[in-house]
Amino acid sequence: MANDSKADVSNDDPDDDPDDDLEQLVGEWLTVPDIGERMGLRLSDVRQMIEDRQVLGARIGPRNVMSVPSRFFTDAGPLPELPGTFTVLGDGRMTDAQILRWLFTPDDTLPVQGAPIDALLAGFKTEVRRRAMEAAY
């Protein structure tokens, strides 16, 4: 059993992509052009938003397209609580993929049903950040 996680990381099977589980865990993704159209932004502005870590993205799908979880956005734009949460988790040496997994993994102990992203959307930023600090260190 101890070798299972090592085997998952070093698996050379091209059909067994570790990002496939991330793609399914997150569910709905938006591509850079999708975000630009939805938010009325130029593609370069969307790319800058990702570069500035206002949102996180991952390369997903068969074409390896840069995409961002749709739940990172409201009608007003990206959730303002995200960058600080990314910073807390990143300071604990989590990769972007690990941060995305943490945000979208269901947690029955949260004050709302679902994952940390659902708690952020419901206004529980302080609780999510507290848990992020615990997870990161």
Image: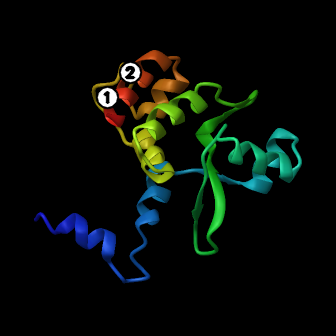
Can you give x and y, in whole percent of width and height, for residue 97 in the image?
A: 47, 53
Position above or below: 133 against 5:
above
> Looking at the figure, which quarter contains the N terminus?
bottom left
Residue located 39% across and 76% down the image:
16
Kindly identify which numbered label has been placed on residue 52.
Answer: none
Pointer 1 and pointer 2: residues touching (CB < 8 Å)? yes
- From the viewer's perspective, is 68 left or right of 42? left
Q: Position of residue 26 (x, y in %)?
A: 49, 49
| Image: 69 above or below 84 | below
Picture coordinates of residue 61, whole percent (x, y): 58, 68
Residue 12 relative to residue 89: left or right: left
Relative to 41, residue 11 above or below: below
Total marks placed: 2
Element at badge 1?
helix
Residue at 58% over, 31% down = 82
* Residue at x-position 63% and y-position 50%: 68
Res. 110 image quadrant: top left
Q: Residues within 10 Å of mark 1 (few under 14, many from 20)?
A: few
Q: Quadrant of the C terminus?
A: top left
In the rendered view, does 126 fall on the left or right side of 70? left
- Which secondary structure lies at badge 2? helix
Q: Give amino acid for label 1.
A: Glu
Q: Which residue is mark 1?
A: 134
* Camera-side residue of 122 and 19: 19
Amino acid beneath label 2: Arg
* Residue with the mark numbered 2: 130
